[in-house]
Amino acid sequence: MPRTTTSRGAVIPALGNAFREHGYEGASMAVLQEASGLGRGSLYNFFPKGKEEMAQAVLDDIDGWFQAHIFTPLRVAAVGDAADARVAVRTMFAEVDMYFRSGSRICLLGAFAISHQRDRFAHTVGCYFTDWIDVLTAALIAAGTADPKSTAFRCIALIQGGIVLARALNDPAAFTAVIGDATAMATLD
């Protein structure tokens, strides 16, 4: 039986889980209804444009989390001293490990980037990765890292590849190892 949800924001995490589990195409309205506990009418009340609006709301929610927990702290660190910047970069990796649940949670933006949905959500996906590379580069400059742009690019690639590897092997330790390697590379450990 559908439950009553009083806000649009309250249903977004459940929709995010449905998109992570089934992909965009596989997340039918029936799947989204079941995941959210809402009937079709309630979902359309919150998201009048349908599934695409639901997916965009999930991506925006993810972006909000990354802005608050990753991008803004790195921006602040970029104007600090080298020690503070290295701490912020280490903290970024810890937050990323937590967010992706040691690689057991897929990166929905990464999944959309390599799927048929890439063009549909190109702006959001592109901005997510560009912003992350840019703010990490700025923090790495402040930290005194040699070749900060390349290091930032490689760190993000390691994170994304680590998620895929950990899920493919069903081994969170693979993601933890990748995070450790990326942390050492970025923080001059």
Image (cartoon, rainbow, N blue to C red):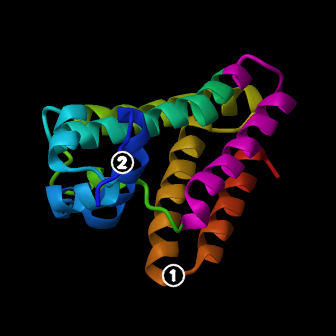
Residue 126 x %, y %: 32, 36
Give the residue at x 52% y 68%.
104
Amino acid residing under circle 1: Asn
The picture quadrant where one finds residue 88 is top right
Question: Overall secondary structure of the magenta stretch?
Answer: helix
Question: Which residue bears the numbered disc 1?
Answer: 170
**Residue 149 sits above or below residue 156 on the image:** above
Residue 122 x %, y %: 23, 37
Q: Secondary structure at mark 1?
A: loop
Q: Secondary structure at mark 2?
A: helix
**Residue 185 sits above or below residue 34 on the image:** above
Residue 112 x %, y %: 28, 51
Amino acid residing under circle 2: Leu
Mark drawn on residue 109:
2
Instruction: Pick whichever of labels 1 and 2 is earlier in the sequence.
Output: 2
**Residue 124 sits above or below residue 109 on the image:** above
For the residue pair 72 and 184, the one nearer the viewer reads as: 72
Magenta residue span: 76-103
